[in-house]
């Protein structure tokens, strides 16, 4: 009887997880591709921006010193 009480919370937990996973709306392949492209483009943009900023600050420091 004690074993049944220990299993019950686990069973209800996993049933709850499965229930919530069924309610989840997953992105389509097209949405994943779109979002991934946006992330990559944004990262590349900031990479170039901060690289240029770093070069500019480096040149400015060279001029000052």
Image (spheres, rainbow, N blue to C red):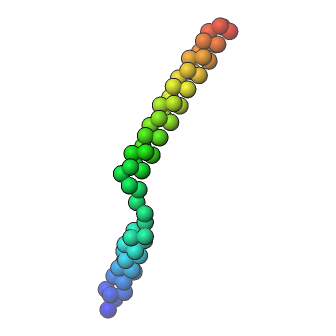
Residue 13 visible in the shown view: no
Q: Residue furthest front?
A: 30
Residue 44 to residue 39: above or below: above
| Quadrant in the rendering for residue 3 | bottom left
Q: Nearer the viewer, residue 15 or 22?
A: 22
Q: Left or right: where does residue 44 sit relative to residue 64?
A: left
- The quarter of the image holding the N terminus is bottom left
Residue 62 visible in the shown view: yes
At x 32%, y 87%, the residue is 4
Instruction: Tell me residue 28's x, y (percent).
Output: 38, 55
| Quadrant in the rendering for residue 59 | top right
Instruction: Tell me residue 11's x, y (percent).
Output: 35, 79
Instruction: Tell me residue 52's x, y (percent).
Output: 55, 20
- The quarter of the image holding the C terminus is top right
Q: Left or right: where does residue 47 sit relative to residue 56?
A: left
Q: Residue furthest right?
A: 64
At x 36%, y 51%, the residue is 29
């Amino acid at each position: 009887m004690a074993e049944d009480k220990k299993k019950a919370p686990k069973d209800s937990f996993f049933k709850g997880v499965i229930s919530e996973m069924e309610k989840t709306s997953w992105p389509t392949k097209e949405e994943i591709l779109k979002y991934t492209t946006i992330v990559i483009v944004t990262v590349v943009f900031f990479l170039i921006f901060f690289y240029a900023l770093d070069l500019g600050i480096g040149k400015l420091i060279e001029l000052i010193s």
